Amino acid sequence: MRAGELLDGWRHILTHPGLRALFANQMLVGGLIMATEPLLAVLLLRQLGFPPWQFGLAFAVPCLGGLVGSRLAGRVVARYGRNRIIRIVGALRAVWLIGLAFVGPGLAGLATVMAVEFAIIISMSLYNPVLATYRLEQTPPERVARTLSAWSISSGVSIAACTALGGLLADLAGPRAAIAVAGLLIIASPLLLPRRLERDGAPVTSMTTMAR
């Protein structure tokens, strides 16, 4: 894909009120969540002395939340509506990460990681289909590939930047402190969510704009 086509994808995202708000929120949430993964590996394996099999188990078991969430997504959206899912589940994605800063040794620590990761994954599996559907609804067919490519590239850059910054912070203050900072920053991400999504592409007001 040519640079001009990618720029057209970013232009579509950034000039559409609803997509722009969801894009900013997704970049922040995705970047901060992924930035904690290497930090958590250092914390669990090096500082807390978890054996490798427990570390693998801590991330394998919560993946069941993706199966649960994907099975429930259709019924939850049908019952509560898209706007509630975006606001409520979108906000719920942000509240769990801070729990990883309090992980301790032993089985209690292992259970904490599993519970936090399970909650994050099930929230994401409920939220992501709604986001993907709205993004396609609001994107003309001739711009779908450009928009998705621009979105995907931005997501990769966001994750890379947050991971690098998290590593620098962990080098200065330790992995637990870096995870805590990521957990605190992500709590502010729901302010970027739109209050309402319109099917016809009408302007969408974000919570931040309403507060102003």
Image: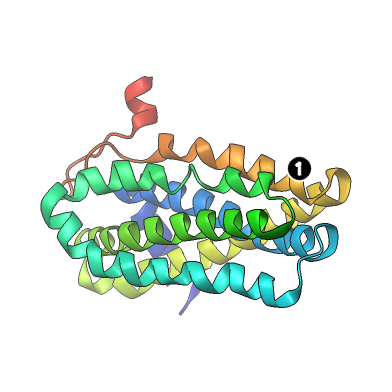
The residue under label 1 is 177
Rendered view: 182 above or below 8: above
- Here the colouring is rainbow
Rendered view: 69 above or below 208: below
Furthest-top residue in this view: 212
Answer with left or right where residue 134 lies relative to residue 178.
Answer: left
Write down the quadrant of residue 50 in the picture.
bottom right
What residue sits 39% from the left and 63% below the top? 8
Residue 200 in view in this figure: no
What residue sits 37% from the left and 21% below the top? 211
Mark 1, secondary structure of its residue: helix
Furthest-front residue in this view: 107
Rendered view: 46 above or below 56: above
Q: Camera-side residue: 85 or 22?
A: 85
Furthest-right residue in this view: 172
Q: Amino acid at mark 1?
A: Ala
Q: Position of residue 5 (x, y in %)?
A: 41, 71
Q: Quadrant of the N terminus?
A: bottom left
Q: Camera-side residue: 118 or 201?
A: 118
